[in-house]
Image (cartoon, rainbow, N blue to C red):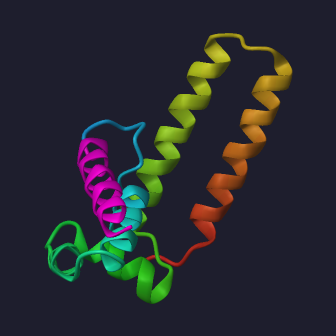
């Protein structure tokens, strides 16, 4: 089981790093999942993540206060608006757009009701 947690953690860490440059891949949620996996498999990797100057602060903010940084909230909102705009431009079926809009509104509500740093 330890090997599975380490493998999933490394994969999430890598995808999160890619997400720092590609707006549609969620960086911090993947890093949170990586920290979760490392906490159950590798004390060394977990310690490295939470003490890393870039990766550590958002993880600690979430773990200690359930907080999401204001910059992250703005970037998430912008990404959601771009994705929904693309869906509208593609003229998907109204039911698909309505479901997507409701889900994205729920995501935005969750993000913006979390405390900031």
Is the stretch drawn in magenta largely helix, strand or loop? Answer: helix
Q: Position of residue 101 (x, y in %)?
A: 73, 37
Is residue 112 shown above or below 45?
above
Is residue 95 shown above or below 61?
above
Q: Which residues are magenta?
A: 1-20
Q: Is residue 8 magenta?
A: yes
Query: Which residue is at 47% across, 59% downward?
Result: 73
Pick whichever, 29 or 98, lies toward us. 29
Q: Among all residues in the image, which is located at the extreme right?
A: 95
Q: Is residue 30 magenta?
A: no
Q: Position of residue 44 (x, y in %)?
A: 15, 79
Position of the N terminus by quadrant: bottom left
Pick whichever, 46 or 73, lies toward us. 46
Q: Position of residue 98 (x, y in %)?
A: 81, 31
Taking the image as drawn, is residue 117 in sight?
no
Query: Which residue is at 40% across, 41% downward?
Result: 25
Pick whichever, 14 or 89, lies toward us. 14
Position of the C terminus by quadrant: bottom left
Q: How many marks?
A: 0
Query: Which residue is at 29% across, 55% downward?
Result: 7
Please state if 49 lies on the left or on the right of 84 as rendered: left
Q: Quadrant of residue 91?
A: top right
Q: Position of residue 37 (x, y in %)?
A: 37, 69
């Amino acid at each position: 089981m330890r090997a599975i947690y380490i493998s999933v953690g490394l994969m999430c860490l890598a995808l999160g790093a890619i997400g720092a440059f590609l707006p549609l891949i969620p960086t911090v949620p993947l890093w949170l999942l990586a920290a979760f996996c490392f906490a159950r498999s590798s004390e060394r990797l977990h310690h490295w993540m939470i003490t890393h100057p870039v990766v550590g602060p958002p993880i600690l903010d979430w773990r200690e206060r359930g907080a999401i940084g204001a910059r992250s909230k703005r970037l998430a909102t912008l990404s959601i608006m771009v994705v929904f705009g693309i869906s509208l431009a593609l003229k998907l079926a109204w039911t698909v757009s309505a479901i997507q809009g409701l889900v994205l509104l729920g995501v935005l509500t969750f993000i913006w009701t979390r405390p900031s740093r």
